Amino acid sequence: MPRRYNKKLQIKLSDLRKLFCRRDLVEEILSGGKDPVIYEVYQISQPPSEGVFSAATTVLYPGKIGDEYYFTKGHFHLKEPRGEVYIGLAGRGLLLLQDRNRKIDKLSLNKGEVAFIPPNYAHRAVNIGDEKMVFLSIYPSDAGHDYEIIEREGFSKIVVGRKGKVALVDNPK
Amino acid sequence: MPRRYNKKLQIKLSDLRKLFCRRDLVEEILSGGKDPVIYEVYQISQPPSEGVFSAATTVLYPGKIGDEYYFTKGHFHLKEPRGEVYIGLAGRGLLLLQDRNRKIDKLSLNKGEVAFIPPNYAHRAVNIGDEKMVFLSIYPSDAGHDYEIIEREGFSKIVVGRKGKVALVDNPK
């Protein structure tokens, strides 16, 4: 039973180039030689087995591409039914939930809040604050990550900051 | 998906009268008209379903009966394989793990620490500090609690404070 992270992931803008709405802005930033880190994941990963858990702490940096806030890729679980629990440790954020019919729901995920992700929902964290958003996620070690559907189709709504307000709007893509 | 607790449990000394080693001291306290609260549990309980989670925050008060530190009852899961995750939020504590052969292991569960409970292990939290021990537990909503084995047989080891030191010693019962 590991007590500290045994796997670290660093996700940069170039890893998310197909996911932000304003791809033109992404390419502009990248072609200027910059590739900012969007988030880092520190996983306490255990071998996949029914009834066994893994955990991860994610640090999602503040920022926007155009008016779209930085987010995590988002994924369904490969094995269902497998839910997940998110616990807000710092900052101010949202959790987007999307079912298999692309219906969207959102939950706040601020410091100290617990959010349950039901089985069969894709989930994405969005940093809507000015500081790092940090959260702990607890998930079945046998759940697996299916990023493909989201990479292909995106979420049906995006989270933007316009005129100082946070809004959930239809994905124009 | 509830966001706040929907069930509160309050466990007093009289609820644990058969579990502390020094039953004579327990009866002495109770017969004196006192029945202190040992711990409180605030559950975010969801209907039992595979892949769905529940959560609970437990406040375990500091104290001893004789030299044995206050603890939670401890339980196996009714449905296996079903593990659990504990996250230390405040205070200083231990987590006792006991397998089906009564073999004992212990993990620290201090503020900020994450502890994984594998399937098929009974688990009990023990407050070894001078302040409240608070922890969050995340568990499958279909796991269920089997308190009966522990109520009948206890854990094979107990946690005591002797001469200012914390020790794990054989259960004299």
Image (cartoon, coloured by chain):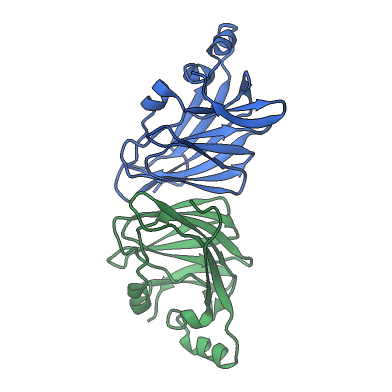
Chain colours: A green, B blue
Q: Residue at x 54, y 58 (%)?
A: A135
Q: Report which quarter residue A4 is drawn in.
A: bottom right
Picture residue at 63% right of the left edge, 21% below the top:
B67
Side (left or right) of A23 relative to B32: left
Above-or-below relation of A85 to B128:
below
Q: Can you give x and y, in whole percent of width and height, for residue A3 in the image?
A: 54, 52
Q: What is the count of numbered marks? A: 0
Q: Residue furthest right?
A: B164
Q: Residue furthest bottom?
A: A31
- A24 or A141: which is nearer to us? A141
Instruction: Name which residue lies at 42% across and 32% down.
Output: B102
Q: Does the rendering let one see residue A162?
A: no
Percent from the top left, x then y, of residue A70? 53, 73
- Judge by depth and name the residue closer to the eye, A147 or B101: B101
Height in image: B121 above or below A25?
A: above
Give the residue at x 55% y 89%. Answer: A30
Q: Is residue B34 visible?
A: yes
Image location of residue A144, percent across then percent down: 36, 63
Of A7 and A91, which appears nearest the observer? A7
Q: Position of residue B149 (x, y in %)?
A: 37, 26
Vertical placement of residue A102 versus B88, above or below: below
Q: Nearer the viewer, residue A163 or A150?
A: A150
